[in-house]
């Protein structure tokens, strides 16, 4: 059977599955059963999910967990996290509890501006273009009014539009570089609609502009799109405590631990190989909350990593210091998040996640997400600089291995108990299962 098909999107869901199973699974009914096993019996809920994207054949589950005990700016939160990695929620919860007993997390939004650009080509005199731009700038803003008026009523909208000369990098390349305030919306649709309107007005006005020569009149719009790099949509989260309170474990010297912890952060500040893993751990917390709250984790990832490289070398997103015998640990990251629009009112679990967080504003959600990232990094660095990461990881991973071997509840209980006092490497767990099953 041919592996190419036209009109796939027009097939019914069951015909799509039939085609997939026949073409890629040798008509194996088991494949069909697995696909259907994930369908929701609530027809309306299933239809809602089917319609989020094109060509849906089933649902892909991720665990939705909760990390309680987060004290953020004096308010308690149980943070929802959607993630498959076994140790992440446990680590967040542990860090939350630790800092709850030390005053909690402090977070503040430093700025909320988002960016979009119209990229275009113009082969003519810059001064002439600049004069044209200044003349028609009010018209660009005016023509976008039908798009911006509701946002403006709420206090947001277009902040500014600049003309940027990029001809040093590409001959004839210019930008309309626009800044926006989108309040509680992530704002992608709003920004893109504004930009496409700017591009249309810009091109049309150029055709009527007397100051241009005939060649200059034909401005060539390449594309209009928001930027996911939002270095002016910044949030900061911090924890601090006296150095002496930094450990509960009497076998660990608090001062030594603080010094080692700060060294680990400094290494991530200067060494990209370490920084990527360090920041990956931060993103374990960030992505999980971003996903649970229906936000675009790809946008957040792209923007955060660009920010981590802003000084020319990929570096740590967190920082730490000791000052006057106090340990400080903080993160500063760009986050473009929304608590209205998009999936936020459509996806029942996303709605529930936002309700769990007391229906936050976008600014409050930025703070919560930054805190989740900081907590995750604290937990990772604490393990790495003391016991090592594998002890905790393998404990959490134990259940995955047990499930892989289809362990019974009784076997699970016995082996979980066994590995409380034994090192849980993959091979040790496999050995233990085998020996338990020996007649
Ligand atoms: C694993 O998902 C994340 C860590 O590697 C982060 C880190 O090394 O800091 C533990």
Image (cartoon, helix red, strand yellow):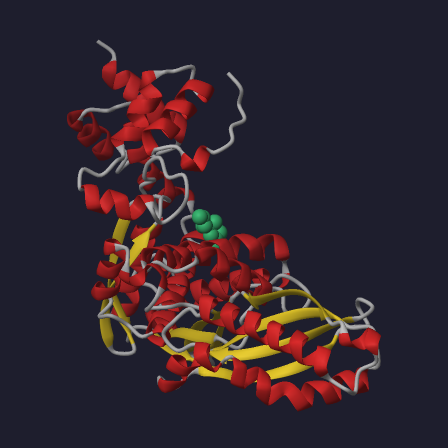
Q: Say which residue appears at 39% left-offset and 73% top-offset.
A: 243
Q: Is residue 59 above or below residue 433?
A: below
Q: Say which residue appears at 33% left-offset and 59% top-offset.
A: 343
- Residue 373 rendering spot, x and y as whole percentages: 41, 62
Between 15 and 85, the residue placed more toward the observer is: 15
- Residue 94 rendering spot, x and y as whole percentages: 29, 57
Q: Is residue 250 visible?
A: no
Left or right, 276 with respect to 258, comes to right
Q: Residue furthest top?
A: 439
Q: Is residue 433 above or below residue 159?
A: above
- Residue 397 rendering spot, x and y as whole percentages: 34, 37
Left or right, 42 with respect to 394, comes to left
Q: Is residue 417 above or below residue 295?
A: above
| Picture quadrant where residue 38 is located | top left
Between 379 and 21, the residue placed more toward the observer is: 21
Q: Say which residue appears at 34% left-offset and 40% top-offset.
A: 60
Between 208 and 197, the residue placed more toward the observer is: 208
């Amino acid at each position: 059977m041919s592996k190419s098909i036209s009109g796939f999107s027009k097939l019914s869901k069951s015909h799509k599955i039939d085609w997939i199973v026949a073409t890629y699974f040798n008509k194996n009914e088991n494949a069909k059963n697995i696909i259907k096993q994930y369908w929701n019996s609530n027809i309306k809920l299933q239809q809602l999910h089917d319609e989020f994207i094109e060509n849906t054949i089933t649902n892909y589950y991720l665990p939705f967990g909760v990390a309680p005990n987060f004290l953020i700016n004096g308010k308690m939160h149980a943070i929802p996290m959607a993630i498959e990695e076994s140790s992440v929620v446990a680590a967040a919860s542990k860090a939350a509890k630790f800092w709850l007993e030390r005053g909690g997390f402090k977070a503040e939004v430093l700025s909320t501006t988002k960016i979009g650009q119209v990229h275009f080509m113009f082969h003519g005199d810059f001064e002439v273009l600049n004069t044209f731009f200044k003349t028609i700038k009010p018209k660009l803003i005016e023509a976008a009014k039908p798009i911006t008026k509701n946002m403006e009523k709420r206090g947001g909208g277009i902040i500014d539009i600049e003309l940027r000369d990029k001809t040093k990098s590409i001959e004839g390349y210019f930008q309309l570089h626009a800044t926006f305030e989108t309040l509680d919306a992530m704002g992608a649709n709003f920004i893109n609609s504004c930009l496409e309107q700017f591009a249309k007005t810009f091109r049309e006005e150029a055709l009527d502009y007397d100051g241009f020569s005939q060649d200059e009149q034909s401005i060539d719009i390449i594309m209009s799109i928001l930027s996911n790099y939002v270095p002016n949509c910044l949030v900061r989260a911090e924890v601090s405590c006296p150095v002496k309170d930094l450990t509960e474990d009497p076998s660990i010297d608090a001062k030594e631990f603080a010094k080692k912890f700060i060294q680990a952060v400094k290494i991530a500040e200067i060494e990209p190989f370490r920084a990527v893993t360090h920041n990956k751990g931060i993103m374990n917390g960030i992505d999980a909350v971003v996903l649970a709250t229906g936000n675009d984790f790809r946008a957040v990832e792209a923007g955060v990593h660009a920010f981590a490289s802003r000084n020319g070398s990929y570096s740590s997103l967190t920082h730490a210091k000791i000052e006057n015998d106090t340990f400080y640990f903080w993160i500063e990251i760009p986050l473009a998040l929304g608590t209205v629009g998009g999936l936020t009112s459509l996806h029942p679990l996303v709605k529930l996640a936002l309700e769990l967080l007391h229906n936050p504003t976008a600014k409050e959600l930025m703070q919560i997400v930054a805190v989740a990232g900081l907590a995750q990094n604290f937990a990772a660095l604490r393990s790495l600089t003391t016991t090592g990461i594998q002890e905790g990881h393998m404990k959490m991973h134990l259940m995955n291995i047990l499930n892989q071997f289809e362990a019974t509840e009784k076997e699970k209980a016995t082996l979980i108990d066994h590995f409380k006092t034994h090192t849980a490497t993959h091979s040790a767990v496999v050995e233990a299962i085998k020996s338990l099953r020996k007649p």
